[in-house]
Amino acid sequence: MSDTVLWYTTRGAGAVTLILLTAVVVLGVLSALRAQSPRWPRFLTTGLHRNLALLTIVFLALHIVTAVVDPFTHLGWLAAVVPFSSYYRTFWLGLGVISFELLAAIVVTSLLRGFIGHGAWRAIHWLSYASWPIGVIHGFGTGTDTWSAWMLILSLACIAAVAVSVGYRFMNGARDPLAEQRTAFRAAVERRKET
Amino acid sequence: MLAGRDLTAGPEGLNDHVRRLGPVPAGGPEIIEVLTRSGLTGRGGASFPLGIKWRTVATHSRGTAVVVANGAEGEPHSKKDRLLMTTRPHLILDGAFLAARAVRAKQVVLYLGEEHHAARQSMSDALAERSDEERRIVRTVSSPARYVAGASSAAVHLVNAGIATPTTTPPSAHESGVNGAPTLVQNVETLAYAALIARNGDAWYRSAGRRGATGTLLVTMSGGVAGPGVLEIEAGTTVAEATEMAGGATEPPGALLVGGYFGSWVDARQSWDLPLDAAALRTRGLSLGCGVIGLLPQSRCGVCETAGIMRYLAAESSAQCGPCFFGLRALADACSRIAERGSNPVDMQRLQRWANEVKGRGSCHHPDGAVMFLQSALKTFAGDFAQHPAHWRSQAPEARRPP
Amino acid sequence: MKREMQISIDRIRCDGHGLCAEILPELIRLDDWGYPIVAPGPVPQHLMPLAERAVADCPVLAIVLRRAERAKPVSA
């Protein structure tokens, strides 16, 4: 009986992780786009982005732990951290591990942002554009419920949300008001050939 | 400094230089004492006492310091640095090597404007005449022809990172500049004077000067004078005396611009007795800057001149800080609207408000200099700003050529 | 005795996101172009938590809290 509970928990937590991570990515894009309105200040976007990311980690941990502990899967703890090291659904689980580790790097660097500086933090944060799709593919490949109606609709909705927001972001640029002028000026004052 | 040899005879070669002035003392850190006693201040615009600056760099130096001889001359109407470089290059080099020995530097950087071909040629020829051990430690770096590229932090940043943009101040260049080494950035005129003081002593330097000021300095007289150009004057010379030396005014001026584009407009009637000396001007709330004195004839319009200069300064922002880039642009546009279409209370209010908001909110001195220039214009040309008629502007907008 | 801190903004890093002004409107307001104008002087103790939040929330880490000190003379 407890096996089934574990099994359902793994699947449920996985689905919730997908929803939360999708929300986090969309909020991150909205933050870069500087979206705001009189009733929705920017710090709300940032605050939600952060808090939902932490919540995502909680559900992701639940998803991983219940999967490892479940006797049916025969997964050891090693399988949870070394990609492609499990016998059970090797490839798809491996993708899940990669997605999880990218996310862990992003969260840890964000918590330590004051120490590592903005440049390093930003470089690692770009990995989020890898973490999310790899996680989605993991879900499709290894998910038991993938082709059930509710999961399919949910997944497509998440994909649509990210596709629209990311598409919009890259068509519109990051909204730094001085980016163009700064680049033009820097080009004008680059080092010349010296004697 | 400039006396004793005809200025039109071209750059002075090493032999003539040594024969005329004698050899420069080998010297070391003790020269800093002499310079401190002389009271020599920097000629790049900030008028900072040399002794303090050299001592700071010397203290931080462990034989790794760098001397940057700044001959970029970014201020458009200033000509003194180029004149020195094309007529007395060895004096400048003497000063640079003197500084290198005083602060125990292992490199000298010559920072020269990329478009100042005559000056570059003259300095390069002079360098070729120097000894091997002097030549070995020198490198020449070109400054892009932009206003802010002549600033000391931009010079350091160009050498370090390849881009001549001013940087956020800490740490200061004296502690960590070129390649992280303690760096002394000094204007070429200052270095030339240091070389003369090393030869002749601080008492010799202090013996010149009028009305309580000491030493001599170079100024560039421009605008409505019969003979515009560079003059070497005793510190404390009045504007009236300097104008006479420059051939007199072509027509009675309405106002003077003291200190170039980062200086201040002063009403002509109050300016004739102004002593041209950094310290004396400071007590009157003015700044000598790099020594550009411009006479604006009465027939020219102060508002239109100010608008033109503001447009230039706004276009020269490095676009690193929002308040500078957007603020100066907005201020310049407001001035232009008043110049083109006539006075209006909305733009006058904006000028006051934005000027107060922009000041101090950039990372370097550029917006502050521009705002102080504008505020001096609002004071000196108060009547003209309040009642300006619409002028026809034949000048092309957004000209990068300085007005 | 709690140390007095004051707000300091790196003007080159600042991109005018404006979160600091949302979090700490008592001390920070935005100019016509979205860049912060900070009220001079140290941060009052009761506003310190908000000031720390503003520092943490800045997307580009352009705002910091420094020990409040008397203005030093600026060297060339």
Image: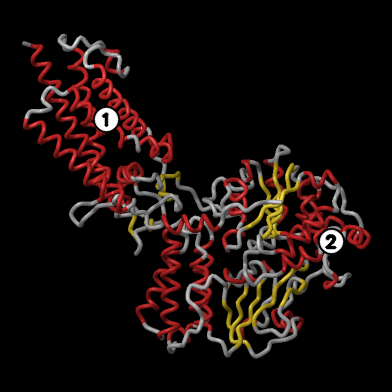
Q: Is residue B64 above or below residue B297?
A: above
Residue B65 seen anywhere in this rendered image of the structure: yes
Asked which secondary structure carries label 2, the reply is helix
Q: Chain of mark 2?
A: B
Q: Is residue B59 above or below residue B39?
A: above
| Label disc, if present, on residue B155 of the rendered structure | none
Is B210 in front, or is B317?
A: B317
Q: Which mark is residue A134?
A: 1
Q: Quadrant of residue B23?
A: bottom right
Q: How is the image coloured?
A: secondary structure
Is B92 left or right of B278, judged from the image as shown?
A: right
Cα distance in 3D space between marks 1 and 2 = 78 Å
The residue lying furthest to the right in this view is B19
Q: Amino acid at mark 1?
A: Ile
* Residue positioned 64% across, 47% down in the render: B174
* Disc ID at residue B203: 2
Q: State the image coordinates of residue B145 (x, y, percent, origin top left).
A: 61, 62
Give the percent coordinates (x, y) of residue A5: 8, 16
Q: Horizontally, is B198 left or right of A69 in the view?
A: right
**SS label for mark 1:** helix
Q: Residue at x 72, y 66 (%)?
A: B82
Q: Is residue B165 left or right of residue A152?
A: right
